[in-house]
Amino acid sequence: MRVERFVFPIIRQVVARPRLADALFRWDRWGNQLGPDRYSWPYPGFERIRADGPVAWHRLYNSWFVTGYNEARELLSHPNAIVEPQRELLFEVPPYTKLSPRATEVVTQFLLLVDPPMHTRLRALVSRAFTPRQVERIRPAATAIVSDLLDAVADDPEPDLFTALCQPLPVQVISELIGVPRDRWAWLQECSSSMVKILNPFVAFDPLEVSETVADFDAYFRELAAERRAQPTEDLLSALVEAEADGDRLSEDELVSMVAFLLFAGYETTMGLIGTSLVALARHPEQRARLMAEPDLWSSAIEELVRWDPTVQSDPRSVSVDTEVGGVTIKAGQSINVFLGAVNRDPQVFSDPNELRLDRNEAPPLSFGHGIHYCIGASLARMELQAALDAVLDRFGAYTIDESRIEWVPSLVTRGPRVLPVRAVT
């Protein structure tokens, strides 16, 4: 029995009790990595970990931690690096053990949770459907969705842009991409808010609620897929239904799981990325002013914002056999956490890494991962981010944010605000 089975429940208890966490980690050289600071601004804590080297072991967590950029690239693309042991560990502890068999099946087939050869097969099929052409097809629609969402709060002097923009935008854009009718968008956002809880292993969720949501989702998309088989359109669901590689196609169960993965992986990450980027530009008004004055900066600005404060902070792995990474030997089966937020601030790779520079032109950030598990929706997320920021800057100008009212998602895996009050300054 792996010791990590006992670690998850303990961490949940500690995360829910900040004073207990402070007491437990008072004398630890890394400080309290489970407290509220991890949600609001984790980067000083990452620097304490980096002081132990780019690949460091901590006995208390029974895990390796990677904070070096080159070491992260090496590990994430290493043929020995695998994800399925981490997935199996997760589904051995409550509340995951109480999910329905179908809910478990849907989630365990997510691309980010499977290794080759299954990953190779599924990735090949979805890549034939989720093409750059699909992203470009919905660019005008994404711009229109952003405009409609901001129109809805035009009379509010200080709207919460998390609720008004960050939260609904990714669901509506992916709905448009997949081909979900508008009258189902609100329902799909509710599904997303329920099912995405599975992606945060350190916060308990109601397995019955999630299982019921998956059942509704499963039934709806089987029906919609049948409609697309009978009458294909230009949308992504039609492309997934028709996708073929060497005579192979997605099964009905795999098709539903793939749609769920594309929706929910893109929901949480893009939602958080828009929010953290809005905060970053408010905190660095001189950089925001440059972006407003120099439209040619958009390409490098998006990459810098993706580097500066990524939504996905932890990318877990194991290795199938003893493997050397960054000069240390990781034993087969040991847990590894690649801290993407720290990796993107590696001073060996990025000059002045703790400065936001929208004209930065250095190594590509690893915010969307690296290797075979590189985020398949990265181009879609970048497109949504630019559409959202462009519209906010146009309407709100040199906006301000009341930092005292920002609330951050309480997650050790992802980052982003869940309350974001913005006031226009034009």
Image (spheres, rainbow, N blue to C red):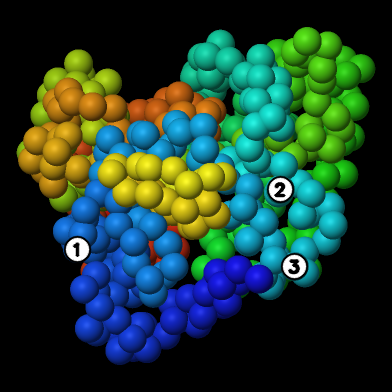
Label 2 vs 1, first from the N-terminus: 1
Q: Please give the residue where the numbered disc 1 appears in the rendered image.
A: 48
Residue 391 at least partly seen: no
In this view, 124 is above or below 204: above
Give the residue drawn at x 51%, y 32%.
79
Question: Tag 1, which secondary structure?
Answer: helix
- Residue 305, labelled with which disc? none
Q: Is residue 185 above or below residue 34?
A: above
Q: Is residue 193 left or right of residue 237?
A: left
Q: What's the residue type where badge 2 is placed?
A: Thr
Work out whether 257 lies above or below 251: below
| Residues marked 2 and 1 touching at CB (< 8 Å) | no
Question: Along the polypeptide, which appears first: circle 2 or circle 3?
Answer: 3
Q: Secondary structure at mark 3?
A: helix
Q: Callout 2: few (<14), some (14-19), or many (20+) C-alpha neighbours within 10 Å?
A: some
How many marks the image carries: the answer is 3
* Image marks 1 and 3: residues in contact by CB distance under 8 Å: no
- Give how far apart the Cα atoms at labels 1 and 3 are: 35 Å
Give me the residue at 71% from left, 49% from top: 107
Q: Earlier in the sequence, mark 1 or mark 3?
A: 1
Using residue 132 as the reference point, say whether residue 159 is left or right of it. Answer: left
- Type of amino acid at the residue the image marks with label 3: Thr
Residue 174: x and y in percent read 60, 33
Q: Which residue is mark 3?
A: 97
Q: Which residue is mark 2?
A: 108
Which quarter of the rendered picture does the N terminus lie within? bottom right
